[in-house]
Amino acid sequence: FSLPIQQPIQSTPSLATFSVDVKHCRILDSRASVQGMEHRRFGGRGWGAVPRARQQQTLVFGLLLSFSAILSFSAAQEPGACCALGDVTCQSPTTWEGMFDCDHLEWNRISRFPPWEWYKEGTSLAVQSQCRGGSNAFKRCSTDADCTGGICAMPQISASKYVEDFMSCCKFCSWSMLFPAAAPIQVTKAPMHKSNALKEIVDTLDCSLFKGEFDELDVDGDGYLSEQQFGRWFEKTPMRQMVEQQMLNTEFTFWTVDLNKDRVISFQEYIVLRHFWTPVLLSNTAPGVKTGTLADGPLGGLFMDDATVSVWVTTANNILLNLYLNNSWPAAKTREPRSNEELELKRLSDLDGSTRISLEEHYFRYFADIDGDGRLSEREYELSLFHPDSKSPAASTRLTFELHDLDGNGQISFMERKRIFADRDENGILDFDEWSNADYPLIYGPFQGHSSGGERIPPTEYKYYMLYHDCTVRGSLAYSRALSSYPWDKSCPLKVSARNREPFLFNPTDLSMVPGNRSELLGGYAVRTWANITSRLLWTYEWELFPEEVATPGKPLEDYHIQPPDLDSRAFHLALLTEQETVPPDWTCSETIWPDDAFVVAVNSNPVRTDLYLIAGKLVISSHFVNFFCTLFFTVLFVGHIIWILEHWGNGEVFRPFYGEGVMDGLWWSIVTQTTVGYGDKAPGTGPGKVFAIFWMLFGLIMFGVFSGQVTVFIEEETAVNNIAGPDSIAGFRVGTLQKNQKLNIYQVYGFTNHYFDTLDEAFDELGSKRIDAIVASRADIITFFRKPNDKYAPRPADVNCGNPFKIVGFPIPAAELTQAQPAVRVCGYGKGVYATTYLTQAVNSAIRNMTRDGSLAAIASSASDSLYPAAMEDDTCKDETQWEVALIVVAILLLLFYASIIFLSENAQAQKMIRAVFFPSSAAADTEAQGEAVGSVTASGGDSEERKKPKKDVVVDPNDLPPVLSHEHADEMIESAKRLGVFSAMQATDVRRMQREMKEQRFLMERMLKFFAVCSGLVLCSLAAMAGILLVIWGDQIQLAKYQ
């Protein structure tokens, strides 16, 4: 059962009263508030006084209690009743003119009483008695008998509630101070029974005189003021002085007062001006100015600032004290506001947060917003002065409801209305001058921050500003926090996109959507830091995760779906980046949220070992050695000719005269002399030759010194990669960087040979193969590579047995040296024409700085160090590699023993005899026989003559008793001794020659044996060296990689 309602229905004493819950369609008992007023928060306005009678509409059905009724929504936005003197019923105004059609006779009548008694003295049918207590509590009554167990009394209603509910068209006759909350103090005129000293003040407050003031300005009597006619208002005190001192701009004031922008001012618009400007007139004060003049500043000087409001509340209290004392009313009924009450008064009056209260704000809050929800419905708009005046001589239908309702939600917020007010050229786009003159607060961002082009703000970007303004104002009021604390309302959800990248963020539960603030379902440093940031800022958010594998090749940031805010859902999209990428120019990002975020140098963990043989091989084929050898060859050849020319005439025995032989002699001498060997077989004998030799010796020392230095440098270059200890030591090396960091020109800063790679996987493959010496990249990217699964370094480089094959060395690259480098771990959002993103990222920066100061950021980084920098995995197989070349040492010892045995055999006669007996038995027997014959001959030739005459007998000699066989070194001495003794004969000479011949044969055989063993050993060593060199050249990379694996 529904009943269309065109006019609000007033309750009567004879009918039962019900309130209707439209959402749940149930009938509720209507209970009037004893205090007379409720308070609740509203989104752009904060605390607002909302009469309970306007929250619940009443339907009256005396006999049909079983029927349900649904009220139309328009009825909930109708103004309160407007009672006139002698009216039986009080009707609500239905037009914008009626909103100011006050019955001054009725107002003058009730203003003779104290404001807290207005409800008693008003129209008799306005407020009816109700039962207090008993079974019929809150029901209408006439006597106590109607209230079983209770009393019949008139419910107490505050002055502000009475005006809103029963004298709504006279709201401009009183000024509510908005404190105390239950019954706000009302500033209005009062009788002067004892003194007329306050007559000027009372006349200023007397709303019945406003019509006369307007008529005085309206010289043509058409009911409207042109700009010229309105100029007479500035001739009055104190406006004239303010204009003269450039504190008031006449042109902008006219534009401001003309609420419907029809180029004339109606009486109702003048009433709004008069009501707004009365506190200034009574306080005799004006807003302060820091620079320039008020007339050239925002709002043309027509505003009240914090100081003006503070002076007004004090002035109002003094006025009320004088009026109350003059009428013998209790002075305790008025007081000055407490600090929090004054702050709340300023906050409720300042709708845009500019700390200046404009006439637009005053009218929107006090008159146009009937239900106090901070927005105008279509019905409220029709009852407001924003609606076009069809009777105006310059009537215009441009300012429609649809034009005001920019976001199309069926309501007009103050920021939507302010756009119409600011757009003085009426083209729908705001330029910088319009923005500044309309007093858009700088605390919500500069003009350029809301404009994508930097010069104008079109309607779309203004929608983003309105949404941002609403989200921050709602958050500021909801949490009672200043804007500097970066509040954010829950009605504006934050959707945070992030990629699953260890160790910064990993999703063990594999959720693509993590509801609410459930960061405990995730892991990683970035998650913990973000949770701490949002908890400090009191933000709520929702995760939107996607795995690492879905990254679009070449466009990794597209997966974050960063876009302008959604005006329908009021959602803002943010991206929690954990990779070093250059973001698009329309993004806005915070500072890094990771203290270690910087560019660093990565190298191989295992140092390059110094293999002298390999280095020697490289040296032989290197340009250093080849160039030196060719230079040396031509030099010594030239010097050989010079010394031969100088010496072959006077020293022909050493440097033979024949050209071929002499040049070879000179070449031999030049090489021996230059190398400082000084063999001595050839030496210059002439004076010029000796002088030339001196210079040649010195030159040789210098040349070989230089060559030795080049060899040392070559060896240092081969092992210099081990000395890379940070960015300052990579100059001259082969260093890999990523293609995405090409614009940074890191190689120009540090002077290395640059190699670009598309991915870190490619770069580390080259580093592992030692085709580059180091890598310069973001620490976040490198650590992520260490924790990413890898087929080559299974399972992951950080988890390779016996330690990560790569490591980060040295200090990070200072940010001052890479000014264009962007951090990796940060929060970003769409910022082109969306200043809200700048606001959110500034909030993150503020939280990070606070976390840095109190140590919580360092604590989070320390607790996450195990995942950021995991310890090396080692088992029993991980042992330090020996520095001893065991195989080489064993071969060297064997060769040493081999050659030592050869030397021993060549100089030990007994050992030689044993070898001949074993390997050459015939030769050993011949030696024994010859030795016996020699001994016999010597014995026969010795003794006296008598013995020689005796017949010879066979002599048997034991070979073991014979002395050892003489060597060939004793032959000459033996012959000489025989000659002296006179026992040398021809036969004996023959025997000696035979013995010499045999010894020569033995020496020849021994030399052949030695040559054979030496040649065989040399061939074996050369073969081994050649095979090792071939293996190193062909399989060097595979051997090195196998070593790492």
Image (cartoon, rainbow, N blue to C red):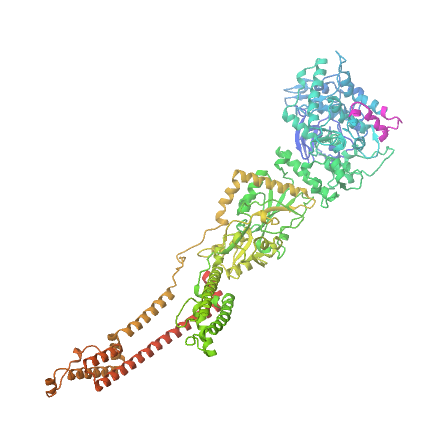
Q: How many marks?
A: 0
In the image, is 892 to the left or to the right of 929?
right
| Image: 958 above or below 781 | below
Q: Could you say which is closer to the camera, residue 979 or residue 57?
A: 979
Q: Is residue 218 magenta?
A: yes
Of the pair 137 and 811, the residue shown nearer to us: 811
Q: Which residues are magenta?
A: 216-241
Identify the residue at horizontal 82%, vertical 39% (top origin).
Answer: 398
Residue 1028 in which image quadrant: bottom left
Question: In screen coordinates, is 1025 left or right of 1005?
Answer: right
Residue 741 screen position, x and y as percent: 60, 54
Furthest residue toward right: 220
Q: Quadrant of residue 518?
A: top right
Would you say residue 307 sits in the magenta stretch? no
List x then y, in percent, for residue 261.
81, 35
Left or right placement of residue 489 versus residue 367 in this view: left
Q: Position of residue 864 (x, y in %)?
A: 50, 46
| Direction bottom: furthest residue | 951
Q: Residue furthest top?
A: 194
